[in-house]
């Protein structure tokens, strides 16, 4: 465990269970929490939820080169309790007024807003991520959007040193062939979202996955820490962040 304090200036990916690692952090150190937790969604019933994540999210039914990830098979009640528990710890670690932003889909949106408020955060709204494409279904609306629930650790003064940011982000998912994680979010979207944190604030992502939040923070000049349970993805994220260069910037 590295020493995370208000003088931390770099980036780090820590391997471990988010809740356990969060308990090791000091109080009031992070300037913002930005994350994409396991949705425990992607199916209409519990049998569907218990399928491998590659079957639920990647669109590749066989020969999938990306390892599955854990924590995505909880029922709604268990998931909401778990969300509340780690959000309580994250708020303890966050500075007063620090923002929190979390990706989610429509199925778990109500549960996420409940957990956020039960953990003591101030709920401030829901942003829209327009993925621009989805599987068409005749006679139905496209499931084209996901959402970002956001809030703050108490009062959030208008004088904060942060820009005016959009409420809708329009960007396609990265092509599957270029992803290093099954549910990887677009780097361009994350680069916008991290700007809600005041300059110099340390950004925390408790569910680092592909390391996109930490990479976006680094590119925008923020120190950042990610936590990742999977050994494979922790190593892949760290390698991606350390080795980011002109090829990926142009992609």
Image (cartoon, helix red, strand yellow):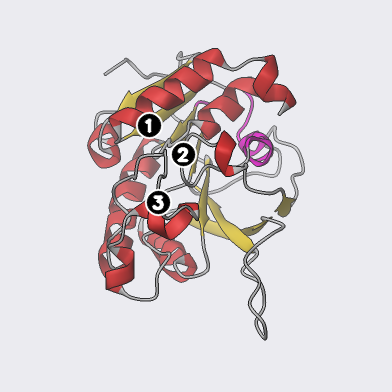
Direction front: furthest residue:
63
Is most of the magenta stretch helix, strand or loop? helix
Q: Is residue 89 magenta?
A: no
Residue 49: percent from the left, percent from the top? 32, 65
Give the x, y percent position of residue 82.
Answer: 28, 56
Q: Which numbered marker is on residue 233?
A: 1
Residue 119 appears in which quarter of the rendering? bottom left
Residue range (magenta): 187-202
Instruction: Tell me the distance, in whole angstroms, between the alpha carbons under discs 1 and 2.
Output: 7 Å
Residue 85 rendering spot, x and y as whole percentages: 28, 52
**Residue at the disc numbered 2:** 181
Residue at 57%, 38% in the rendered image:
177
Disc 2 on helix, strand or loop? loop
Compared to residue 79, the image places residue 102 above or below, namely above
Which sits earlier in the primary sequence, circle 2 or circle 3? 3
Looking at the image, is mark 3 or mark 1 earlier in the sequence? 3
- Asked if marks 2 and 3 touch (Cβ < 8 Å), the reply is no
Q: Is 27 on the left-hand or right-hand side of 35?
A: left
Q: Secondary structure at mark 3?
A: loop
Q: Earlier in the sequence, mark 1 or mark 2?
A: 2
Q: Is residue 249 above or below residue 66?
A: above
- Residue denoted by label 3: 62
Expressed as whole percent of the image width and height from the top left, the position of residue 84 reads 32, 56
Q: Tell me if 210 is positioned left or right of 53 in this view.
A: right
């Amino acid at each position: 465990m590295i020493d995370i304090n208000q003088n931390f200036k770099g980036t780090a990916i820590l391997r471990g269970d988010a809740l356990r690692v969060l308990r090791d952090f000091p109080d009031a150190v992070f300037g913002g929490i930005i994350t994409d937790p396991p949705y425990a969604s992607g199916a209409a019933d519990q049998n569907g939820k218990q399928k491998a994540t590659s079957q639920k999210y990647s669109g590749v039914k066989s020969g999938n080169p990306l390892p599955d990830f854990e924590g995505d098979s909880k029922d709604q009640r268990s998931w909401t309790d778990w969300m509340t528990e780690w959000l309580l710890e994250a708020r303890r670690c966050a500075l007063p007024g620090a923002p929190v932003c979390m990706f989610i889909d429509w199925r778990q949106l109500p549960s996420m807003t409940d957990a956020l408020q039960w953990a003591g955060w101030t709920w401030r709204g829901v942003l829209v991520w327009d993925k621009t494409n989805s599987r068409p279904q005749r006679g139905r609306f496209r499931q084209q959007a996901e959402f970002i629930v956001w809030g703050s650790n108490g009062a959030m003064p208008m004088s904060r040193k942060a820009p005016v940011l959009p409420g809708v982000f329009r960007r396609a998912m990265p092509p599957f062939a270029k992803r290093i994680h099954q549910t990887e979010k677009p780097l361009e979207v994350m680069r916008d979202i991290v700007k809600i944190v005041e300059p110099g604030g340390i950004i925390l992502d408790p569910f680092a996955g592909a390391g996109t939040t930490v990479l976006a923070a680094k590119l925008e000049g923020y120190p950042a820490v990610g936590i990742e349970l999977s050994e494979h993805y922790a190593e892949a994220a760290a390698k991606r962040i350390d080795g980011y260069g002109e090829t990926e910037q142009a992609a």
